[in-house]
């Protein structure tokens, strides 16, 4: 089910005769009978579902994967499942369009808790029209889909045909509370509302709020990562390192070819797609003054000798966990004095931000520590207004002058979503304490636009950000991306070593 209809046109008809139908269904080798191995993510997904089950006893919980989305006319975007669905099933990459995970409450006599059932569109038989004629789902067009048995073996959940979903939701719908992750699939949300209405339950604000509470709970559930997730993050970071090193190896190519930012984007994207599922977000390949546009993803600019290039990019592995790393690189391999001055200030801020990370510290301490160092440098450079000191600008009610040169936050949670756990409240996020297993970025920057008349001339047109991915450990933190050099001297040595290969 897609929330949008694809345009139907008869301008490219595919004539089909009865003779062809009977011919195309015959003469195929038997389908493979071996079932897939249990997915490494399966036991972890099961443990997550058990946590959800404890929180919502007796309720029926509906977590859709979402549907295919039209890119144009009859072409879809590559599918990506909703993050809550991926987290609770262990499915990643492009699986499984239109699938719906339902946690059905079990009676006490059946052991209580919930039974997990995955409803999806399984492989169609060769005797069906779908087999050869359905360009969106058919085997001839998009390849063989898994069977119900395949998915049961792979994930350790029960699997049913998607056509059984409606009746399964309607069972005891008057007596069993239903909750759905509404934004995952509007068609499934509408189906749930319809089933509720038929059972005499209107989709009042209260009912919708209960749905939203489920979505928020599932978002926050992703905050502390389990060992499988940390391992996936390590793989994403290792793959990202390959992409960064490929970019560095061909910075000269980016300069020579023109439109070098696109060349950098393509080089990283090649490796992201080769090493993993793809990029976890559109790469920011920002040379010179473009680094001062925080989300510069147009990447239409030149990469010029003497400039810095800010590369903010991350590989998403097949399980959908993504890295989010920034390095700001001197295109020539050596920072100028002014570039190094900015870079070393950002590095000091990043180091201070990292050192604030330990269990029990507040999430907001990371930004507080980093931004203090930024403010101190701006003050030392004489950039804050006359008479404004570091404490004055850091005051949250007044001042905040330093934000002119670093307007963004220093940190965010990272995981299946690059900005993970987005539905957490301020209390659960900014004001919350850090716990072992949380993965966050530390990413201060300094941005001096070319037309900023308050910036020293030597800084204008240059922006620096350094971003690493850090896991909270029992005694502090581990920088998961420490394998990518960070200090100005180490970055220069890194570039030189790659060029010498
Ligand atoms: N790449 C987006 C971010 O750093 O948050
Ligand atoms: Mn980030
Ligand atoms: Mn980033």
Image (spheres, rainbow, N blue to C red):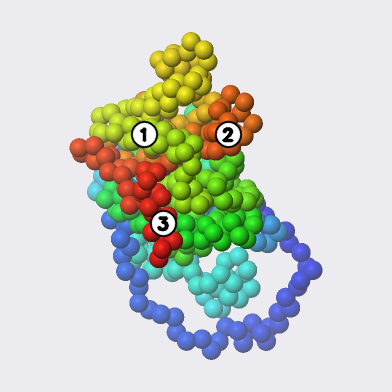
Q: Secondary structure at mark 2?
A: loop
Residue hosting label 1 = 348
Q: Secondary structure at mark 1?
A: helix
Residue 123 visible in the current orientation: yes
**Residue at image x 63%, y 73%?**
133
Q: Which mark is residue 460?
A: 2
Q: Secondary structure at mark 3?
A: helix
| Quarter containing the C terminus | bottom left
The single residue placed furthest to the right in the displayed view is 11
Q: Are marks 3 and 2 in contact (CB under 8 Å)?
A: no
**Residue at image x 49%, y 48%?**
330
Which is in the foreground here, disc 1 or disc 3?
3
Q: CA distance from mark 1 to mark 3?
A: 23 Å
The single residue placed furthest to the bottom in the displayed view is 27
Q: In the displayed structure, does residue 378 sit left or right of residue 437?
A: right
Q: In the displayed structure, does residue 49 sit left or right of residue 254?
A: left
Q: Is residue 304 above or below residue 126?
A: above
């Amino acid at each position: 089910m897609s929330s949008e209809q694809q345009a139907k046109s008869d301008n490219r008809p595919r004539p089909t005769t009865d003779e062809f139908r009977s011919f195309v269904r015959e003469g195929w080798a038997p389908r493979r009978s071996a079932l897939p191995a249990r997915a490494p993510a399966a036991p972890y997904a099961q443990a997550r579902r058990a946590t959800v089950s404890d929180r919502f006893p007796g309720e029926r919980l509906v977590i859709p994967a979402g549907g295919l989305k039209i890119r144009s006319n009859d072409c879809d975007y590559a599918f990506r499942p909703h993050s809550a669905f991926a987290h609770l099933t262990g499915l990643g990459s492009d699986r499984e369009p239109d699938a719906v995970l339902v946690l059905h409450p079990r009676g006490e006599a059946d052991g209580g808790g919930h039974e997990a059932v995955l409803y999806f569109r399984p492989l169609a038989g060769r005797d069906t029209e779908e087999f050869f004629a359905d360009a969106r789902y058919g085997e001839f067009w998009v390849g063989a889909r898994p069977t119900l048995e395949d998915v049961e073996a792979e994930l350790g959940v029960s699997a049913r045909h998607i056509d059984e979903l409606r009746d399964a939701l309607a069972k005891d719908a008057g007596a069993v509370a239903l909750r759905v992750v509404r934004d995952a699939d509007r068609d499934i949300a509408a189906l749930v509302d319809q089933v509720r209405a038929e059972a005499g339950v209107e989709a009042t604000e209260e009912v919708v709020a209960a749905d939203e509470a489920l979505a928020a709970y599932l978002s926050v559930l992703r905050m502390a990562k389990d060992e499988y997730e940390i391992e996936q993050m390590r793989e994403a970071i290792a793959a990202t390192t390959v992409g960064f090193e490929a970019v560095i190896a061909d910075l000269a190519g980016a300069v020579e070819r023109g439109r070098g930012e696109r060349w950098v984007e393509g080089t990283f994207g090649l490796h992201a797609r080769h090493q993993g599922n793809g990029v976890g977000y559109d790469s920011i390949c920002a040379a010179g003054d473009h680094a001062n546009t925080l989300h510069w993803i147009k990447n239409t600019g030149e990469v010029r000798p003497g400039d810095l290039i800010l590369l903010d990019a991350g590989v998403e592995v097949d399980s959908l966990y993504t890295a989010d790393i920034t390095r700001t690189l001197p295109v020539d391999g050596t920072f100028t004095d002014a570039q190094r001055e900015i870079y070393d200030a950002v590095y000091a801020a990043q180091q201070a931000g990292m050192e604030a990370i330990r269990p029990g510290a507040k999430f907001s301490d990371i930004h507080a520590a980093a931004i203090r160092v930024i403010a101190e440098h701006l003050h030392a450079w004489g950039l804050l207004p006359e008479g404004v000191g570091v404490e004055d600008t850091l005051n949250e009610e007044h001042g905040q002058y330093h934000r002119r040169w670093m307007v963004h936050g220093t940190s965010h949670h990272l995981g299946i979503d690059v900005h993970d756990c987005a539905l957490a409240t301020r209390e659960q996020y900014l004001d919350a304490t850090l716990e072992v297993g949380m993965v966050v970025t530390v990413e201060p920057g300094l941005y001096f636009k070319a037309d900023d008349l308050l910036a020293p001339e030597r800084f204008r047109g240059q922006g620096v950000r350094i971003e690493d991915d850090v896991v909270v450990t029992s005694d502090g933190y581990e920088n998961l991306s420490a394998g990518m050099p960070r200090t100005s001297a180490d970055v220069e040595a890194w570039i030189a070593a790659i060029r010498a290969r």
